[in-house]
């Protein structure tokens, strides 16, 4: 018999058993190096929050109280914008989902794709397209002026809410459509046998079933509206993100104010994320039935009239902004404006592709161990590690950038001296790290889904044949999860191409990308000069709709 401390029922033995269960070391395929690596990645993702809290702790209490007491208008503006955009997106997205799933709307598959396509247009591109069309001296405003038609003010809450709604409502449309496709139609048929009309049946039978999906989409919209920086800035509407950027670039106590505003924004965001997690986990939803797109409602002679809704929406979300950009592009002066002494160059697009590819590669390398660990283990630590990666996605880009500015310009200088701070501040590695923190959940989610789909018996068979765990992963697991891994990498690449606020604040001096060029010319009021890079960005972003197109073939 061994020493008392080595027995299974001794305190030391119980602690070891608890630790192994907490870490998941008893699960097949989970090793100590994998656990340590996953934990280190999660800690790196959480570090920006630590830097932000450290920065906030240095702000004098009186100054913090003063700013909180005077930021009520910004809070009210942000909350109003979120409520308006979320409500409008639900009122637009749900009817469009019903039309494309449960009715005999002509060309349903075509409209499904077209209705979802606004997601490929960055909202800030849509914003300056609308300003250049409807703003003072805008193209459409000038064209309608001789007819005595006056266009309402495009700036402020109205313009900001309109643009955001037009380019983010697909979040609600897609989630509602997915729920309707999986809805058990026999429930509706049972209600109809009781002589209940469709609208009453929808309210009493369908809506309760799809409500969790609709709510999840609505909360995604709310999170986007809360964290968006470009659209409120272009539309001159003071919300948290815009004021943080203004304070960050001001003198005096600007960084202190930006830090405190960031904490307020993070608090509101945390409430939204917690609400999303709680509602999104509901089990009483329309999911689970076999996917179906059979017609439940015959529109009769109103079939063609019903097409006016998706046609009108696509006009304002696709035809108008793309038309405005194309019109500016064909004009001779579209490439004349200089930024930093240089006109638009193909190298700006290459810079965007390069940094996006680099971010995708690094994110992929870090996502695989986290996804494999969380997919192969049911331990508490595996769950915590995976959830920690989602913090950066929930953190608005301007807040993340502010935290990294503090780390690179202040904390590193204090630890290693000014030379180290200068080497890291506004460097390409720091920018890539910010992208990784922001978009790691996209790669983790796609990869983890593939890991969960791997048959454990295949791995067990390989282990029985004497293959070591690393070779099993390389020769069996990796080829099986490759589609999910590549999908996650592609999603990170495309999202990085469009990222605005993080890129603006952290990009290296002289490193101009499509996004930074677009933003600089729109700040100078030269909207036409942004036409070519914006069109390139829209085309590249459109690649993200390929999975939807492929899925649509089966529906």
Image: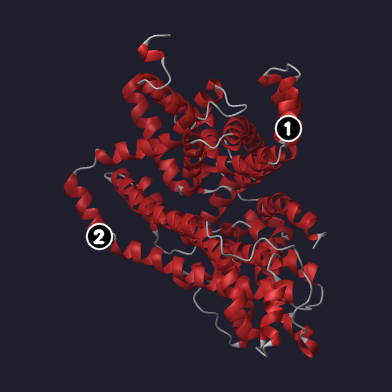
**Above/below status of 252 relative to 297:** above
Residue at horizontal 55 percent and vertical 83 percent from the top: 150
Q: Closer to the camera, 146 or 310?
A: 310
Q: Position of residue 151 (x, y in %)?
A: 55, 80
> Which residue in the protein does label 1 denote?
457
Residue nearest the viewer, comparing 45 with 164: 45
**Quadrant of the rendered structure where residue 98 is?**
bottom right
Q: Is residue 87 visible?
A: yes
Quadrant, the C terminus? bottom right
Q: Is residue 138 visible?
A: no
Q: Residues within 10 Å of mark 1 (few under 14, many from 20)?
A: few
Q: Earlier in the sequence, mark 1 or mark 2?
A: 2
Name the residue at 55% across, 39% down. 435
Q: How many marks?
A: 2
Residue that label 2 marks:
70
State whether residue 182 is above or below residue 516: below
- Residue drawn at the location 59% of the way across and 51% of the way down: 518
> Where does residue 246 sit, x and y in percent of width and height?
38, 51
Task: Give the number of the mark in front: 1 or 2.
Answer: 1
Residue 420 percent coordinates (x, y): 41, 21
Q: Residue furthest toward the left?
A: 62
Q: Secondary structure at mark 1?
A: helix
**Toward which corner of the image does residue 341 lie, by quadrant?**
top right
Separation of marks 1 and 2 at Cα, in angstroms: 61 Å
Quadrant where the N terminus sits is top left
């Amino acid at each position: 018999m061994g020493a008392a401390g080595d027995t299974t029922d001794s305190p030391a033995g119980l602690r070891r058993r608890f630790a192994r269960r907490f870490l998941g070391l008893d699960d097949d395929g989970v090793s100590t190096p994998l656990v340590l690596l996953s934990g280190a990645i999660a800690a790196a993702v959480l570090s920006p929050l630590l830097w932000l809290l450290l920065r906030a702790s240095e702000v004098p209490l009186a100054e913090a109280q003063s700013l909180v007491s005077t930021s009520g208008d910004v809070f009210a503006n942000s909350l109003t914008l979120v409520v308006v955009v979320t409500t409008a997106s639900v009122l637009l997205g749900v009817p469009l989902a019903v039309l494309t799933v449960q009715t005999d709307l002509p060309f349903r598959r075509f409209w499904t794709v077209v209705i979802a396509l606004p997601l490929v247009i960055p909202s800030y591109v849509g914003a300056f397209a609308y300003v250049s069309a409807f703003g003072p001296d805008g193209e459409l405003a000038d064209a309608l002026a001789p007819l005595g038609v006056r266009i309402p003010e495009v700036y402020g809450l109205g313009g900001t809410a309109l643009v955001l709604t037009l380019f983010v409502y697909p979040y609600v449309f897609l989630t509602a459509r997915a729920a309707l496709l999986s809805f058990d139609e026999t429930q509706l048929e049972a209600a109809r046998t009781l002589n209940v009309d469709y609208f009453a049946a929808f309210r009493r039978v369908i809506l309760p079933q799809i409500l969790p999906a609709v709510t999840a989409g609505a909360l995604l919209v709310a999170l986007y509206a809360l964290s968006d920086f470009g659209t409120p800035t272009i539309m001159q509407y003071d919300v948290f993100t815009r004021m943080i950027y203004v304070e960050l670039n001001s003198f005096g106590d600007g960084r202190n104010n930006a830090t405190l505003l960031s904490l307020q924004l993070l608090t509101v965001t945390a409430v939204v994320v917690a609400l999303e997690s709680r509602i999104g986990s509901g089990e009483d939803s329309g999911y689970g039935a076999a996917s179906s797109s059979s017609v439940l409602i015959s529109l009769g002679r109103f079939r063609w009239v019903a097409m006016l809704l998706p046609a009108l929406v696509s006009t304002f979300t696709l035809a108008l902004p793309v038309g405005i950009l194309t019109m500016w592009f064909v004009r001779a002066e579209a490439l004349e404006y200089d930024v930093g002494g240089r006109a638009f160059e193909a190298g700006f697009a290459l810079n965007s592709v390069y940094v996006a590819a680099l971010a995708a590669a690094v994110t992929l390398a870090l996502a695989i161990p986290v996804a494999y660990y969380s997919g192969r283990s049911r331990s508490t630590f595996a769950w915590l590690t995976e959830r920690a990666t989602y913090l950066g996605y929930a953190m608005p880009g301007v807040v993340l950038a502010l935290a990294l500015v503090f780390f690179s310009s202040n904390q590193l200088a204090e630890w290693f001296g000014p030379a180290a701070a200068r080497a890291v501040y506004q460097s390409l590695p720091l920018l890539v790290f910010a992208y990784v923190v922001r978009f790691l959940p996209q790669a983790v989610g796609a990869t983890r889904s593939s890991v969960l789909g791997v048959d454990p018996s295949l791995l067990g068979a390989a282990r029985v044949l004497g293959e070591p765990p690393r070779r099993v992963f390389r020769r069996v697991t990796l080829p099986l999860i490759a589609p999910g891994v590549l999908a996650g990498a592609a999603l990170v690449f495309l999202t990085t191409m469009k990222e605005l606020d993080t890129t603006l604040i952290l990009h290296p001096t002289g490193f101009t990308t499509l996004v930074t060029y677009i933003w600089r010319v729109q700040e100078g009021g030269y909207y036409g000069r942004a036409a070519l890079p914006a069109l390139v960005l829209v085309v590249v972003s459109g690649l993200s709709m390929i999975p939807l197109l492929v899925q649509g073939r089966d529906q």
